[in-house]
Image (cartoon, helix red, strand yellow):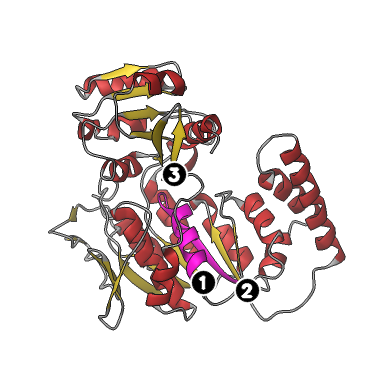
């Protein structure tokens, strides 16, 4: 925790130095940031390095299926009002990437860390966080992460007994089930647009009742807790009932929800909502997400959507029809190799948009669009798709590795 001034041991210093050297070599070879391979080498030399690096920091962990990279960035900006921050801003969110990020923050006061859902419990044990933000849980990478109820159970077991303040979305029953094992929970009404993973009670398996924004299980009594923070339109309501305006450069309702949770986290560290929200305005894009880039004399807005919940939120913020839309889907290791999730996405929301399909799994997506009665064209690559697009800003929606491919192609 912050305040511990013990220097790193010689072994830990050697591990940090070796990790940085390997990461630099990886970058020089053009193989990405090198954060993951550097972290793996460092942890191999000192398996306890993550805990050692975190011991001098006030740590925030952020986990969710969707929105964790953006929320991590918003929290980091807010906490910079109170001191230097180290963060895994590029989204390397498993232990190796987190270790690399913390190794570069020797002068930091706060560590704001995005954590993959599957690794949250272990990283929390290692880093002794002061605060943990839990945003949502929905189906994603079913070949790797299994079903959402199992993840919620892992969170619930892993967080039991934690001293951390848990900031949790009270509108997601799976998150509430996971967080309710913690002694100190701050509930945020951040909303839940995607509900298809939470129709059965995570406590007893009964059918959830969902009148309006409320939810409860009629069989065991498990129900939505009363929030102390809430997203209300374009404002955040704090525990005193004060309404603070949200001014973001990031689009969409989901990012307002991320800002509401971020403001609640910042308050745990003594940063007032007004200050926190003002600082969040500085964020224009997050690891390429929402960037508008020029390519082949056209404006392209790059949007990341990895799973049904993410696609639903993304459809709500694109320009209205007839704005052209390019969709790109891969199924590599980092995406999850199971593309069955495509059938859970409501592609009828794209009716009226000219649609162009690219990516490794463009034919899987084409079949799904055909069934949804959408008009589309399959293209070989981004260049061909852009050439075929009618006038107007092009909305480009891609899943994880497809998004990285696009960023490299447009030089972003």
Q: Is residue 244 magenta?
A: no
Q: Is residue 161 left or right of residue 368?
A: right
According to the image, label 2 marks what residue?
Answer: 109
Residue 132 in the image: above or below residue 338 = below
Earlier in the chain: of badge 3 and badge 2, it is 2
Q: Residue at x 39, y 17 (%)?
A: 379
Q: Local crowd at mark 2 within 10 Å, few (<14), some, or many (≥20)? A: many
Residue 71 highlighted magenta (yes or no): yes
Foreground residue among 293 and 84: 293
Query: As rendered, which of 41 and 33 lies closer to the eye?
Result: 33
Percent x, y of residue 371: 23, 21
Residue density around tag 3, few if under 14, some if 14–19, many if 20 or more, within 10 Å: some
Relative image position of residue 253 (x, y in whole percent): 28, 55
Q: Is residue 13 above or below residue 27?
A: below
Over which residues does the magenta segment extend?
Answer: 57-80
The residue beneath circle 3 is 291
Q: CA gap, disc 1 to disc 2?
A: 9 Å
Mark 3 or mark 1, earlier in chain: 1
Identify the disc placed on residue 79. 1
Q: Give the quarter of the image for residue 147.
A: top left
Q: Is residue 137 left or right of residue 19?
A: left
Q: Residue furthest bottom?
A: 240
> Residue 393: x percent and y percent?
33, 35
To which quarter of the image does residue 347 belong? top left
């Amino acid at each position: 925790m912050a305040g511990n001034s013990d220097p790193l041991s010689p072994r830990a210093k050697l591990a940090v130095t070796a990790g940085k050297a390997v990461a630099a070599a990886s970058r020089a070879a053009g193989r990405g940031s090198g954060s993951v391979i550097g972290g793996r080498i460092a942890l191999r030399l000192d398996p306890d390095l993550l805990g050692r690096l975190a011991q001098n920091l006030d740590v925030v962990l952020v986990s969710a299926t969707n929105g964790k990279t953006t929320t991590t960035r918003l929290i980091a900006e807010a906490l910079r009002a109170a001191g230097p921050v180290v963060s895994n801003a590029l989204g390397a969110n498993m232990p190796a990437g987190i270790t690399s990020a913390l190794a570069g923050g020797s002068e930091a006061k706060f560590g704001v860390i995005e954590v993959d859902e599957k690794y949250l419990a272990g990283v929390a044990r290692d880093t002794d966080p002061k605060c943990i933000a839990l945003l949502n849980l929905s189906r994603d990478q079913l070949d790797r992460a299994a079903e959402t109820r199992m993840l919620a159970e892992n969170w619930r077991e892993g967080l039991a007994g934690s001293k951390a303040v848990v900031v949790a979305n009270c509108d997601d029953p799976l998150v509430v089930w996971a967080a309710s094992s913690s002694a100190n929970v701050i509930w945020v009404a951040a909303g839940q647009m995607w509900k298809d993973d939470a129709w059965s009670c995570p406590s007893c398996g009964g059918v959830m009742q969902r009148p309006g924004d409320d939810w409860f299980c009629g069989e065991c009594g498990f129900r939505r807790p009363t929030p102390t923070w809430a997203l209300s339109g374009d404002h955040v309501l704090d525990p005193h009932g004060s309404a603070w305006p949200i001014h973001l450069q990031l689009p969409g309702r989901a990012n307002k929800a991320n800002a509401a949770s971020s403001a609640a986290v910042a308050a745990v560290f003594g940063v007032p909502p007004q200050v926190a929200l003002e600082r969040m305005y500085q964020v224009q894009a997050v690891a390429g997400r929402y960037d508008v880039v020029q390519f082949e004399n056209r404006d392209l807005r790059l949007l990341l959507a990895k799973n049904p919940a993410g696609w639903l939120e993304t459809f709500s913020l694109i320009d209205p029809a007839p704005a052209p839309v390019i969709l790109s889907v891969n199924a590599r290791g980092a995406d999850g190799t199971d593309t069955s999730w495509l059938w859970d996405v409501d592609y009828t929301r794209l009716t009226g948009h000219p649609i162009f399909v690219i990516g490794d799994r463009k034919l899987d997506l084409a079949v799904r669009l055909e069934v949804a009665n959408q008009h589309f064209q399959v293209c070989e690559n981004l260049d061909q798709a852009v050439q075929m697009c009618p006038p107007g800003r092009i909305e480009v929606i891609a899943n994880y590795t497809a998004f990285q491919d696009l960023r490299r192609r447009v030089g972003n």
